[in-house]
Amino acid sequence: MNSNQLIGIGLRHPHYSQVIEEKPLIGWFEVHCENFFHANSALQYLKQIRKDYPISLHGVGLSLGSSDGILKNHLLKLNNLIQEIEPFLVSEHLSWGYVDGIYMPDLLPIPYNKESLNIFVQNINLTQDFLKQEILIENPSSYLEYKITDMDEADFLIEICKATGAKLLLDVNNIFVSCFNHGWDPKKYINKIPNNLIKEIHLAGHSKKKITDNQSILIDTHDNIVCEEVWNLYSYTLERNRPTHTLLEWDASIPDLSILLAEANKAKTYLERHK
Amino acid sequence: MQSIKSLQSSFKQSILEKDSENLNFISSNHAKERLDIYRQTIFENMRNALEITFSGVWSLIGKECADNATYLFLKHQKNLPTSGCIDNWGQEFSNFLGSAKELQHLIYLKEFASYEWLKHLSYGEKEAKSIEVSEISSIPQEKINTAKFIFLPSVFTFSSKYKINEIEEIIDNPNAPPIKSINNESYAIIARPNNIIFTYWIKNDLFLFLEALMNGSDLTEASKKINQLYPEFDLTNAISFMLQKQIIAKVITS
């Protein structure tokens, strides 16, 4: 597979028509599944774009880390979308959002220990069995840690993959953000991940926020270009892994499509350097 | 050791009730400030979902007032999303606007919000093809009288005791003439033929006729019922309206 085919961008509403009309040179697109659960005009656009490009479906609302289990209705809708779009990848997050009948719309962090591992394994197995499909699990950006955590995030992800057969969507920006926020070492994190587990990489921009006079944390805002440190970490990841599908994400203050494509081209040069 | 279930319930409690006293499940420093980042994202995502669905409400009462109303709405746990598909969420917002003391002077606000919710539902319904004129004209007269009409899934009826149509026009067109009195009924059919949302503001007789058909009356039953109330009701015009606006999915003849 050549570098052009490996690079994709996140497809968002402002670019639907332009993509259909101009058919930009890009390998694939990724969309958030929940935006296409209704059979409305958004889905019509996606079906049109699917005729020309491979599509990856990326979920944000399944809540795989929920101790209350996952909602069957959500799985059903996801399954319907998969039948309709025939994606080449399906992914979700190492996070939770649903408890006690209430859904909090964010990718909330989970403690890493034996009990939470069992919850994830159970929910991922159920999802993969229901969808009859392997899914990829994305490492989250996180802003806090828990007292009951007794494993590190990379080990936790590896254990999940071993137990479920799921693969990894390695978000290099999220590694950078979480490592900055918790004082972890990003290279040690990447070194731990076996190269046969990574099936997709995400790159995105983040922002910095002061939480006290002396302390700032990084927030995964997806509203900017990829910073130099994250490009370097991407390069470091590629040195240790085979060339992998790579996605440029941009979800807020969405720029002109040409800017996203320029970022995608930059990722392509990194991929070619590490062929 | 705290269970994951108990931790997730505590997390939810801290987020929704702004409870910063019991954050002992967090090991990071500045736990409150860190948790605030999640709280802000969660509330902003919910606020944003409501603003997209009820964009007219935001225009009518202004962003600051609408945002404040949202935060009051979200204080009640029964109003919060119950699944990861928050596109389906927000139905209760119109009732909330109708009951909020601070907004009582905007007597039309609840009904305007209900109208926006129906447009949102119409947008989310399944795409379906409307029938062609030729399909109706080929049905023999004796069968058309007892025919039942199935509407596109995206078709919804709406009625209000206020002039919601004129209020909407003011939002869409700032140069629209001022409303003299809002105390006048309005009736509409909302539909999404060919994937575009339309609102057709119609008269009471046509509205009642379409409602009767949607509730299962056949053509004769529906027109008889309307003729009793509105002797001047024109059945041919009504059928022509349904066909022109492409809102009929199927005609069932016995």
Image: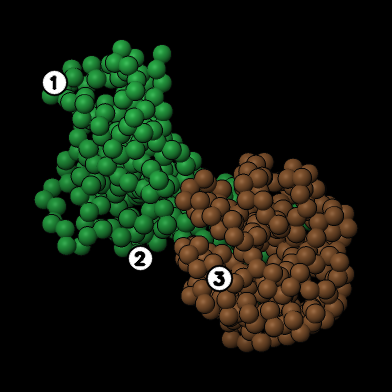
Res. B215 visible in picture: no
Q: Is residue A79 above or below residue B7?
A: above
Give the number of the disc on residue B231. Answer: 1
Q: CA distance from mark 3 to mark 2?
A: 40 Å
Instruction: Look at the image and give the colour of chain B.
Output: green
Q: Which residue is mark 2?
A: B64
Residue B110 pos. (x, y %) = 32, 46
Front residue of this view, candidates B39 and A48: A48
What is the crowding at mark 1: few (fewer than 14 residues within 10 Å), some, or many (at least 20)? few
Chain containing mark 1: B
Instruction: Left or right? Give the position of A89 relative to B160.
Output: right
- Viewer-side label of 2, 1: 1
Chain that bears disc 2: B
The Cα–Cα distance between marks 2 and 1, rounded to whole angstroms, is: 49 Å
Q: CA distance from mark 3 to mark 1?
A: 60 Å
Q: Which residue is mark 3?
A: A24
Exactly how many numbered labels are in the figure? Answer: 3
Note whether B232 is above or below B112 in the view shown. Answer: above
Which amino acid lies under the numbered mark 2 shown in the image of this protein? Glu
The mark that comes first in sequence, 2 or 1, is 2
Amino acid type of disc 1?
Pro
Is B191 on the left-hand or right-hand side of A74? left
Shade of chain A as shown in the rendered figure: brown
- Left or right: where does residue B175 sit relative to residue B21? left
